Amino acid sequence: MSDGVFHFQIGNFECMAISDGTFVYTDESFFVNAPKKRMEQVLRKYDIRSGEITTPWPSLYINTGKNRILVDTGAGAGIVPGAGKLLGILTNEGITVNDIDTVILTHGHPDHIGGNIDASGKPAFPNARYYMWKDEWDFWMSKPDLKQLKLGDELKQFILISSQKNLPPIREQLVLLDNETEILPGIKAIEAPGHTPGHMALAVSSGGEQLLHISDTVLYPVHMEQPDWYPAFDFEPEQADDTKRKLLDRAAAEKARVFAFHFPFPCLGYVISKGNRWEWKPIETSGAKDYL
Ligand SMILES: [Zn+2]
């Protein structure tokens, strides 16, 4: 086993959470509308005192026996120190870029599409069909100005440049989705807009087991405990709230295992319903926390 990887099964599917790297976000960007004092109180319970929230950037790898699937491609090399580990980990695990036949992109933010292409600008997974929600593709191709996000201009610029760099080169290999179809047997797309206009979640099922990949529907367990607080990255906060309620209620009702992209590695756990809010119960792991 290599560093930054966590192996698990969903029924007959062999899976890995693979951390491409980690990044430190500010508490203001994660909880943009939270009252400052209350936020500091809540974060103290999570041992966050400096206002800095470290989260992983994980891809989900699924080997169904027939297909080898990668969900999101991380931030890629050269963006921040310590990111771009995905390909090295795949190699350590005996998987080459040619082995990946399916790449599913949950949305077009830099930490999810940064590994789409290689150093020469060509698709990093030459044999893969890439999948993305159609609204998401159309949004980024329209060169949006992101004016409504309460983020610094430099960061907005960075997000836009990343989308222009990492999306057009995959066009020839891309399939756009506009309904909740089964991408492959056991891998179903779920429309989950709000964080971005075409943000997508996934239901992965095999042998009676289910995993809900909720990507950036919520960015941190605090967003379950304080459901009214939303991140500055959410493009349509009200729509994101609807999506959050729909998916978290479903996860709780179905007792599904959940993969939440920015949650403490390996990003796996269960959602417990608490009336109007939810609680995150991470799976039991040994050693997985070492990567944060
Ligand atoms: Zn993200």
Image (cartoon, rainbow, N blue to C red):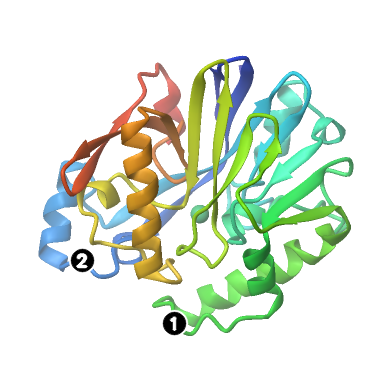
Which residue occupies 49% across, 30% down?
Answer: 211
Side of 23 where 127 appears, left or right: right
Residue 225, percent from left and from top: 21, 47
Which residue occupies 68% across, 30% down?
Answer: 89
**Residue for badge 1:** 148
Counting labels gives 2
Crowdedness of circle 2 by 10 Å Cα count: few (<14), some, many (20+)? some
Instruction: Judge whether residue 53 can be spotted in this image.
Output: no
Side of 159 where 261 appears, left or right: left
Residue type marked 1: Gln
Which residue occupies 82% across, 51% down?
Answer: 118
Q: Is ligand 1 within 8 Å of the beta carbon of the residue shown at mark 1?
A: no
Residue 205, picture quadrant = top right
**Which callout, 1 or 2, points at the residue further toward the start of the chain?**
2
Residue type marked 2: Ala
Residue 26, percent from left and from top: 35, 61
Instruction: Judge whether residue 155 can be spotted in this image.
Output: yes
Quadrant of the snapshot with the N terminus: top right
Side of 45 where 134 appears, left or right: right
Q: Is ligand 1 within 8 Å of the beta carbon of the residue shown at mark 2?
A: no
Residue 46, percent from left and from top: 22, 42
The secondary structure type at the circle numbered 2 is loop
Residue 247, percent from left and from top: 39, 46
**Residue for badge 2:** 34
Residue 152, picture quadrant = bottom left
